[in-house]
Amino acid sequence: MPTGSLLPERTVPGTTVTSRATFRLAAVALIVAGLVWARPLLVPVVLALMLAILSHPVVSFFERRRVPHGAAVALGQLITTVPLLGIVTLFLVSAQPFVNTFDRYQASLEVHLAASLEWVVSHLAEGERRVALEASLRSEVIPRALEFGGEVVKGFAQSVGAMLSAAALTLIIAFFALLEVARLREKFGEAFGEDNALFASLEAIERDVRLYVVAKTLTSLLTALCVWVCLASLGVPFAPLWAMLAFPMNFIPTLGATIASVPPMLMAVAEPSLSSLEAGLVCAALVVINVVIGTFVEPRYLGRALSLSPLVVFVSMLLWYLIWGPIGAVLAVPITVATKVICSHVRGLERIAIVLKA
């Protein structure tokens, strides 16, 4: 027998750690790929769960007044969804006149943008270099910038269309989820026991997500109202449209309100009836609205509902945007809240909850 066979098998230091890290990275990559692949189904499911969470107190209200369970669920969904559908309808109706005049404002904006860039170039270069930079701006930079802006608007419109196309499936899933909520509690109790931490997690998720959505809805309505009053008083065209755009965009953490302010700012610059001073007032007013509501109002009313680190909120927003697009950015905070609650009630995952919290 060879003497080498009697020696203990040697392992390379760090091999186990490297294997575990590789396995975990591969698992994360597979999960992300699955989320992207199953997006057409998962997005309506998540939206339906959020709608069911919002509708559940209304359903319980009708049931306490001896309304049959099926009728209570239908009434709860009706009361919850009709305002949202009304806002979407008003947005689409208000957007049509803007679409009809988009080419005129685009041409005006191109002139203003070219004049501004040429002024900057005149202070940075002289002679032949200045002429070359101005030619490059007119032929490449400005058309590409406007094309990029158009692609962003087109992508947002496609996202709205995707949400509307998934609305029917979302309502159906939410309806059956509300029908089964009582029976699901009984099933979980039989399977895991009444004192299982799962019940505490589900109740905490329902409470925190509802608090977040209600608080965010109120602050978004306040933002939309302030935007409408500001733009209408300063004479910016399509003020109701920009206010209704600010409402859903405010649900995107950190960047949503800022992105929603860009179109009315550009509109104020491109509008011939507004002077440079009035356009500057529009931009300053929108900045003040976003700063005041985002810095003072939202933290006061969302602090209890979130209890998440601002860095975690921002990173989760970017992550879910990459996975599910704009709708993923909207759903990022509720998903992160649910993840934090689950981790706080599962043994071995408490550290993750500690990292996620504020």
Image (tube, grey):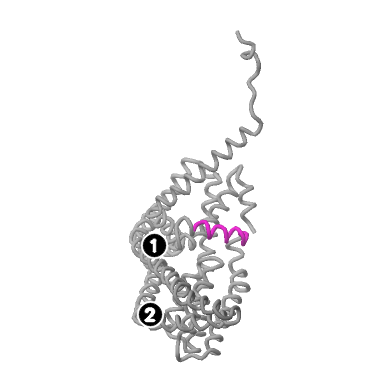
Measured in 3D between alpha carbons, the distance from the residue under mark 2 to the one under mark 1, in whole angstroms, is: 53 Å
How packed mark 1 is, by other alpha carbons closer than 10 Å (few <14, some 14-19, many 20 or more), is few
Q: Is residue 106 above or below residue 357?
A: below
Q: Is residue 318 magenta?
A: yes
Kind of residue at badge 2: Phe
Q: Is residue 303 above or below residue 104?
A: above
Give residue 187's position: percent from left, percent from top. 44, 44
Left or right: 269 in relation to 158: right
Please tell me whether residue 73 belongs to the stretch shown in magenta: no
Magenta residues? 308-320
Disc assigned to residue 292: none
Q: Quadrant of the N terminus?
A: top right
User: Quick one: SS at disc 2?
Assistant: helix
The numbered mark at residue 102 is: 2
The residue wearing badge 1 is 66
Query: In the rendered image, which quarter is residue 103 located in?
Result: bottom left
Q: Quadrant of the C terminus?
A: bottom right
**Residue 232 drawn at (x, y percent):** 47, 87
The picture places residue 230, in percent across and down from the top left corner, at 52, 85
Q: Badges 2 and 1: C-beta atoms under 8 Å apart?
A: no
Task: Say few, some or many: other residues with alpha carbon within 10 Å of mark 2 (under 14 / 14 to 19 / 20 or more).
Answer: few
Residue at figure coordinates x 63%, y 73% from the top left? 296
